[in-house]
């Protein structure tokens, strides 16, 4: 029997992971990337248990995390140094590799599995009957077409699948600093002062990942290379990190994408194209991996691809919606907390964080087991 054929638009983390899994399950896979080369921007990345299990399924885990620090705790710390909440990582994994390591591990696996990666190949349109159209006019029919072209997806628009895009109230700057003796090795600390945040992430033996976030209207804080004095004024006790900010970095606006549907006929939307979300829980790429595992499993050995895609959305979307909502609320409650109630913020969050409801809500995605995960085989 001839292999089923899939055409994928976009070789980011979502496109690459679904390409590997489909190839592993016997599909003939062509992956189109508009850029001339494959590269990952974004310093470090949070990988939770659900994302790590997905990487185990596709055999990318070892290479992805070989240099990563194993994190034991994530803390939110207020401007007085009080811990607002602490999320220990004792029974589940939380690892923090450089993005480039993660991405390279996926590229290597894609090549090993025989995925055909076409760079400088820009996709103009996807058609529900199962056709991917390149910008040069070439039409490429397939059993399955996947749009993985990111948050600003033109392919999602071409299907009229965008419900709304919320460009949010904050931006984020990601950068690396050198690791020095005395820097925490296994605790992620998110320091908050008003609407400003500095997130310290141990990453590798040589480098830490710093994430800075501030309100969109703060032009001074948005400068890259960063204006250290602006950040030192907000976080005087963290000058030892801020002084090490030497990389130019880049700022990204934080946004939220809501789609009307995740599939149309034989076309599926995946990753940020389907559900870009604020990075507050560090789950967007983890969810892309989890959804990629389910998608590949559910379309394989199915004749009715449109039906399988609808079932995939029904199965996966509630969890993704939940994570997207929690990420949004997390950012809004820190960023929009009314000034007159600021004195109560830490007490309120500490109280909330002690409830089972909060624990379940915050960690629901991390505790999800991806489709296709077999502990005896994958670990
Ligand atoms: C500040 C910040 C921090 C984050 N931290 C985390 C974290 O710690 N953990 C986590 O899980 N997630 C995190 N995320 C989210 C994560 O980065 C994204 O969810 C993930 O990178 C999305 O991958 P993607 O493949 O869907 O999209 P993208 O990475 O945007 O990839 C899309 C690809 O498609 C290509 N493309 C676009 N248009 C076309 C076209 N027409 N034809 C062909 N190719 C095309 C692009 O060139 C690109 O390579 C963070 C996001 C931000 C902004």
Image: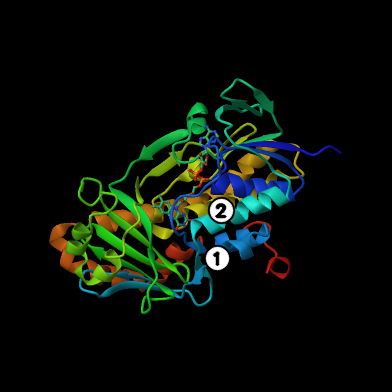
Label 2 element class:
helix
For the residues bearing labels 2 and 1, Cβ distance under 8 angstroms:
no
- Image quadrant in which the C terminus is located: bottom right
Q: How was the colour assigned to the protein in this rendering?
A: rainbow
Labels in figure, total: 2
Q: Nearer the viewer, mark 2 or mark 1?
A: 2
198 relative position to 70: left or right: left
**Observer-nearest of 158 and 44:** 44
Which mark, residue 112? none
Q: Quick one: label 2, few (<14), some, or many (20+) residues within 10 Å?
A: many
Residue at horizontal 67 percent and vertical 53 percent from the top: 109
- Disc 1 crowd, CA 10 A, few/some/many (<14, 14-19, 20+): many
Quadrant of the drawing holding the N terminus:
top right
Image coordinates of residue 376 in percent, x first then y, are 72, 70
From the top left corner, tell me how far across and down residue 359 is, in percent.
43, 69
Residue 297 shows in this picture:
no
Q: Earlier in the sequence, mark 2 or mark 1?
A: 1
Residue with the most extreme left position: 340
Up-down: is 207 above or below 10?
A: below
Q: Residue at x 43, y 35 (%)?
A: 163
- The image shows residue 93 at horizontal and vertical percentages of 53, 70
Could you tell me which residue is drawn at 58 percent across and 44 percent down?
15
Q: Secondary structure at mark 1?
A: helix
In depth, the one of 123 and 343 nearer the eye is 123
- Counting from the top left corner in percent of width and height, residue 187 is at 40, 74
- Height in image: 296 above or below 346? above
Q: CA distance from mark 2 to mark 1?
A: 18 Å
Q: In the rendered view, does 238 fall on the left or right side of 266?
A: left
Give me the disc on residue 49: 1
Residue corresponding to mark 2 = 103
Residue 248 in view:
yes
């Amino acid at each position: 029997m001839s292999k089923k054929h899939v055409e994928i638009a976009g070789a980011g983390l979502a496109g690459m992971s679904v390409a590997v899994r489909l190839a592993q399950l016997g599909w003939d896979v062509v992956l189109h990337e508009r850029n001339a080369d494959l590269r990952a921007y974004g310093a470090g990345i949070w990988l939770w248990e659900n994302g790590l299990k997905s990487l185990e399924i596709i055999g990318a885990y070892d290479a992805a995390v070989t240099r990563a620090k194993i994190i034991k705790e994530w803390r939110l710390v207020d401007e007085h140094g009080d811990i607002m909440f602490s999320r220990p990582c004792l029974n589940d994994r939380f690892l923090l590799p450089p993005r480039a390591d993660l991405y390279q591990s996926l590229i290597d696996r894609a090549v090993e599995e025989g995925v055909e990666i076409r760079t400088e190949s820009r996709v103009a349109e996807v058609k529900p009957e199962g056709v991917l159209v390149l910008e040069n006019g070439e039409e490429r029919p397939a059993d399955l077409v996947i749009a993985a072209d990111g948050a600003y997806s033109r392919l999602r628009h071409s299907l009229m699948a965008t419900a709304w895009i919320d460009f949010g109230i904050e931006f984020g700057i990601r950068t690396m600093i050198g690791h020095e003796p005395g820097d925490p090795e296994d605790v992620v600390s998110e320091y908050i002062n008003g609407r400003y945040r500095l997130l310290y992430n141990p990453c590798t033996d040589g480098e830490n990942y710093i994430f800075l976030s501030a309100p969109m209207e703060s032009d001074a804080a948005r400068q890259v290379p960063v204006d250290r004095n602006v950040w030192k004024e907000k976080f005087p006790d963290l000058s030892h990190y801020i002084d090490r900010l030497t990389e130019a970095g880049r700022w990204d606006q934080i946004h939220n994408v809501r789609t009307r549907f995740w599939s149309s006929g034989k076309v599926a939307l995946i990753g940020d194209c389907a559900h870009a979300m604020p990075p507050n829980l560090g789950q967007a790429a983890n969810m892309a991996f989890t959804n990629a595992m389910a998608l590949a499993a559910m379309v394989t050995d199915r004749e009715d691809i449109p039906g399988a895609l609808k079932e995939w959305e029904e199965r996966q979307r509630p969890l993704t919606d939940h994570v997207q909502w929690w990420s949004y609320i997390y950012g809004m409650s820190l960023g929009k907390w009314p000034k007159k109630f600021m004195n109560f913020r830490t007490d309120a969050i500490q109280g909330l964080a002690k409830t089972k409801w909060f624990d379940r809500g915050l960690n629901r995605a991390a505790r999800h087991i991806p489709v296709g995960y077999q502990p005896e085989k994958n670990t």
